[in-house]
Every structure is written in C-alpha cells, then in structure tokens.
Amino acid sequence: MSVLVVVECDGGEVKKSSLEVASYGSQVAQMLGTTATAVAVGEATEANLAKLGEQGISKVLYDAEPRLKDFVNGAYTKLIAAAAQKEDSKIIVLANSNIGASVGSRLSVRLQASLATNVVELPKTDGGSFVVKRGAFSGKAFADVKLEGERKIIAVKKNSIEALHEAGKTAQVESFSAQLTDADFADAPKQVVMQDQAGGILLPEADKVVSGGRGMKGPENWNLIEDLAKAIGAATACSKPVSDVDWRPHHEHVGQTGITVSPNLYIACGISGAIQHLAGVNSSKVIVVINKDPEAPFFKAADYGIVGDVFDVLPKLTQAVKELS
Amino acid sequence: MKFLVCISNVPDTTTKIAFTPDNKEFNKAGVQFVINPWDEYALTRAIELKEAQGGGTVTVLNVGEADTEPNIRKALAIGADDAIRVNAAPKDAFFVAQQIANVAKEGAYDVILMGKESIDYNGFQVHGMVGELLGIPTVAPAMKLDMSGNTATLEREIEGGKEIVQVNTPFVASCQQPMCEPRIPNMRGIMTARTKPLKVVEPTGDAPRTAVAEYALPPKKQGVKLIPAENAGELIKLLRNEAKVI
Ligand SMILES: Cc1cc2nc3c(=O)[nH]c(=O)nc-3n(C[C@H](O)[C@H](O)[C@H](O)COP(=O)(O)OP(=O)(O)OC[C@H]3O[C@@H](n4cnc5c(N)ncnc54)[C@H](O)[C@@H]3O)c2cc1C
C-alpha cells in the first residue's frame, strides 16, 4: 500500500498548497514505512509533475482527459477512488480547499474511510491510534481527532505544513485512466470565471496578506493597500463590512463567515479586530496592525503595531519596502 | 418543489471558546447558541425560491438534542413550513450526514441545502457525504442558486474564481454569501412558528468514525511591539530582519 496524495494543478503548475499536501503525504508514508503516490487533477505538465519528487513523491498518476482540466466533483471523486484502489491506499491526503473538501467528503463515504479536514500537523501514531490536530471553532481552538477504521482521509490546511524541497529528486509520471463516462461529468461547469487578481496572488494561497477595513474610508483608497501588497508580494483582503457594501469583492472577505487565512504575514489596516474577524486570521504567523485608535482590540492579537493614520502610514511602508531593494 | 434545509446549532460568533476541565468537550455554560450563520443563507434562499415558485415546502432539519428547539423555532419563524429534529447529539460529520440522508430519502426532497460548514467544528464535510449517501450531485460551496423547472444553475466557488454549474434535482448544495440577504424573523413569523409542526425522530445508521480526543486553545501572543508612526519605515526593517517574513 502507498499513501495517496491528491495534487491540484492550475495552468500547468502544481499549486503551492498541493506542494504542502505532497510533503505531508510523503512524511506520513515515511512514518508508515511505505511510499507516497500522487494523483494529479487540473491542468498539469509532465515536467512539473515529475518535480513532485522534491516533495518526496515517488510516482504520479495523471489522467489527461481534457474535461478534467476544470473541477468536476463527480469525475474527480471517481478518479481518486480508482487511484486509491490501484495503489491499495489506506491513507489519502488532500488540500483543505474547496476542491479537496468537496472530493474528500464524497470519497470518505465511498471508501468507508474516516475523514479529518482542516488538519494542521502530522499525525501522532503512538499505541496504534491515529490522531491528527485540526483547527476548530473558526480558528479559536484546535482539536485532536482520533481517526477510526482502516482507511483515513486527511485534508491539510494551507500554510500549516512546510513544503519539502529535496533538490534533484524526480517522481515517475504514469498516465492513468479511470474509465470516466459522461455521467461522471454531470456537474461539469458550463463556464469558468477566474478573478482578475492584482499581481496574480490568490488570497487562499498567499503567504502574505494586506487587508483593509472600514478605516480605509472608501474603495477609492484601496490603491494604498494594493501598492503595499504589490511591493511585498502579498494578496489583498478585507473585513466583512467592506465586502458587504461592495467596496471590495466578496472573495476577499476574511473572518469567521468569510475565508480563513493563515499566512506568514497579515497586515491589518483600519480594522478594529472584532472577534469574528480575528477568528479568520489569528493563525497567521506574524500579525501587524495599523490603527489610529490605541484601544483597538486588534492590538491585543498583534505582534507588531503602529498607532497611526493609515493614510499617512501606508505610503511610508510602501516607500520603505522600495528602499530595501 | 420540496426543499430540505439542514441547520446546526452553534455558539454565537462572539463566544469566547472554553472547554471542560478535562479538555474533552466544549463548555456550554453561559454560551448563547444561534443558527449557524452559513445555514441562514441556505434557509433564506430556500424560502425565496419557494415564494418565487408560488408553491412547495421548506422543511428544516436539525440533528440535535432538545436544547436546539429554540433555534428550530426561529427557523420556522423566518419562514420554513415545518421541521424535523433527529434526537441525537451530532457526534461527527458522518453520523450527521447519515441522519440527513435518511430523512431526505424518506421525504423524497428535491433540493437539499445547508451552509458551507458549521462555525464550531468547521468540518465542511456533510454536504459531500449526504450527496454520496444519496447518490446525487453536490455543489459546494455555492454562492448563487437559481431554479428553472427541475434544473438549478449554481455558482460554485473555486480558489481564484467560480464555476457556473447546472444540475437537475435532486441535488445537494452548501451555501455561502453572497447568495442572499439572510432574513430575520418578524412578529407574525414568530407567532405562527409556535404552531408549525416539529417532528422528533430517533437516529439510525452506523457509529461515528472520528472522535475528539482533546481540545486546546491557540498559544497566546507575546504582546505587541509598537513602532511610532513617524518611524513607520522601521516596521519594514523589523519584518525583514527580526520576523524574517519579507
Ligand atoms: C454573525 C457575524 C459574523 C461576522 N463575520 C465577520 C467576518 O467573517 N469577518 C469580519 O471581518 N467581520 C465579521 N463580522 C463583523 C464584525 O463583528 C465587525 O463588525 C467587523 O469585523 C468590523 O469591520 P472593520 O474592522 O473593518 O470596521 P470597524 O469595526 O468600523 O473598524 C474600523 C477601524 O478602523 C480604524 N480607523 C478609522 N479610520 C482610520 C484611519 N484613518 N487610520 C487608521 N485606522 C482607522 C478605527 O479605529 C476602527 O478600529 C461578523 C459579525 C457577525 C454578527
């Protein structure tokens, strides 16, 4: 049996979160004395798949069926189930992404596997049990969860596992067919609309985020956020009221009822730090808060802070970054 | 058309999370419970679609013990027609999914809606499990849902964009913003909710497949290092040389 890792690809490249997933899977394989095989979904190139060797993957299965380029829940589930059967995999690791969670939940029923999503650490396997740590209560807590049964599926939270990079190692890429039929494509998209992302950095994948709240006063001031984001290579985000009034698109809304992010750096500009906002960002490694109110609750959750006016501070920060390089 | 809306009962979003002394359970003492905010999108959208179709029913379903009934009544007050409570603590996602699938099968529902995930356990699992148990498509997470006859057109969020997906009934969708503006109960709704049917059924199915061994709170922050605004550029140096993040 080998550990099966699901890697998501886009535009030929393996997504960063999938490099983390691959590294997670290969470390679990090592703990269990076996190898890790990947099954790739989305648009991939053979050269990039072979490079998964650097994350400890020995073999990659790839079905070049063109309709698999876009996410199709039915077809992806069948493909991964077939790969798991071929590899006799008892453990499947995927990303805690919209794709990973959609597919993982269906697979868990089909394969009679236990499932843990939002997992942040490698498993503990003492005494024959299998325990993973996962985020719960929207970032306000963690839970150690025991996975029962012979088969297990683990969805790994983004940016929680350091990707391995063993330069020069390559994986063997094998073409693979799951004999998909039209019925498996019932939920195939009629159309795919990608966001127009400033600087091309997607918020869910970003390791740095610059975020703005109501203190930014209006959408016309977002260039200040975007300039700093561009300078440091960050994605942009916002608080809920900002997306509620359409200053920014909804997919930038972070927090308990938006998306949860855990970048290495989160810079909050003119955000008060309400508990629902903090829930979505407090697993960020370093938090910087810029707020003119020294009593703003966000300072209690911050590593670095500037008590000041965003309109004065943000241009200075962007300038300082430019002076660094 | 018959809509089934699954709601969970979760701690209010302002809750400070605490656990029992052995760290094995969430400490409910003094905590106010609400309808899971994501489920509110599912509920309101189901009601809107029913109204637009000029007929049909919206049934709310909760897997929970008797203490969840105030929030089930609230869902009825918002506009659901009737409710079913499966009388069991929601032990894990698989356990809950089996209860939902059973109810859905028995009642031959056309559209099964729920929130993207619950804000307490953040599983984001139930939708797919229910779809698989029933052998029907799942669209998750859905940002938009329109119906025309038996065909639904949905926007499914994917990282970095969205897919426009069409599926026929029956199907499962897990909902999130900006699907609709969640409604709040009005006086008339609250009055009529008292007499709407709420059926209690006993759980069936297999045992849960996961168990929480222990909860923990995140490590506390060390305290904030403040940099004077006049010297804002200093922050960038600290982020590079001390925190090593840029
Ligand atoms: C059920 C529920 C779910 C929720 N979910 C979320 C969620 O997922 N995400 C989320 O973000 N919120 C969420 N909220 C809302 C949350 O409670 C707060 O209302 C929201 O986060 C506040 O956004 P804000 O910080 O941008 O605005 P405000 O609270 O208005 O704060 C603005 C801040 O900007 C500062 N400021 C103003 N001008 C300047 C200036 N010139 N320079 C510097 N600082 C300035 C002010 O001092 C203030 O601290 C939720 C609420 C509920 C009830």
Image (cartoon, rainbow, N blue to C red):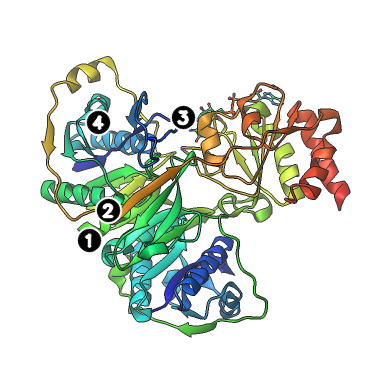
- In this rendering, the label closer to the viewer, 1 or 3: 3
Q: In the picture shown, does residue A26 fall above or below B1?
A: below
Which is more N-terminal, label 3 or label 1?
A: 3
The residue beneath circle 1 is B135
Residue A189 in view in this figure: no
Q: In this view, does A167 lie to the left or right of B79?
A: right
Q: Residue at x 76, y 29 (%)?
A: A311
Q: Which of marks 1 and 4 is in front?
A: 4
Q: Pinpoint the chain carrying mark 1.
A: B
Chain for disc number 3: B
Q: Mark 2 lies on which chain?
A: B
Q: Residues within 10 Å of mark 4 (few under 14, many from 20)?
A: some
Give the residue displayed 38% in from the left and 71% down from the top. A80
Q: Along the polypeptide, which appears first: circle 4 or circle 2?
A: 4
- Dividing the picture into quadrants, the one containing residue A211 is top right
Q: Distance between the residues labelled 1 and 3?
A: 39 Å
Q: Which residue is drawn at 18% across and 43% down?
A: B1
Q: Earlier in the sequence, mark 1 or mark 4?
A: 4
Same chain under badges 3 and 4? The reply is yes
For the residue pair A129 and B158, the one nearer the viewer reads as: A129
Q: Which of marks 3 and 2 is nearer the N terminus?
A: 3
